[in-house]
Image: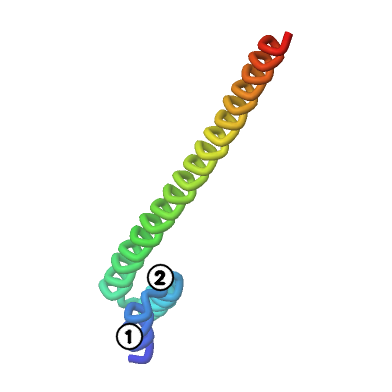
Amino acid sequence: MIYEEAITLAKESNNLELQDMILNIMKDLAISIKDYSLAYSYLEQKVDVSNIRFTEKAKKDQLELETKYKTSEYILEAENQRQRTRVTLLLLLLAVGAAIT
């Protein structure tokens, strides 16, 4: 069947959205010809693809949050370092001023 070939090509390309769409069409076609065991088979495959998509999205979201967190940590550390440098310079100026007077 042409849809079986389409599923195979989608799986080989790792395009989960395409796999999901094709499996949905296949499930609907199987229901329309009243082949419920085939429809159930496609539904099971669709659930597997959806789980993989959900897992990949969760991993991507987690990585994005970790990146934002680490970036904010670096920004905070840079700001703290800048403040420490400013305080050190002020203390140095006070010491020089006290030594001069």
Point 27% across, 71% down: residue: 41
Q: Is residue 11 visible?
A: yes
At mark 1, the secondary structure is: helix
Point 39% across, 53% down: residue: 59
Point 67% across, 17% down: residue: 96
Q: Is residue 31 visible?
A: no
Question: Residue most toward the right?
Answer: 101
Q: Which residue is mark 2?
A: 16
**Local crowd at mark 1 within 10 Å, few (<14), some, or many (≥20)?**
few
Q: Position of residue 92 (x, y in %)?
A: 63, 20
At mark 2, the secondary structure is: helix
| In front of the other: 93 or 32 | 93
Does residue 64 appear to the left or right of 100 in the view shown?
A: left
Mark 1 to mark 2: distance in Å? Answer: 15 Å
Which image quadrant is residue 16 in? bottom left
Disc 1 marks a residue whose amino acid type is Glu
Viewer-nearest of labels 1 and 2? 2
Does residue 35 appear to the left or right of 62 in the view shown?
A: left
Which image quadrant is residue 48 in? bottom left
Q: Position of residue 45 (x, y in %)?
A: 30, 68
Q: Position of residue 5 (x, y in %)?
A: 34, 88
Q: Position of residue 86 (x, y in %)?
A: 64, 26
State the quadrant of the N terminus.
bottom left
| In front of the other: 47 or 59 | 59
Q: Which residue is mark 1?
A: 4
The earlier-in-sequence mark between 1 and 2 is 1
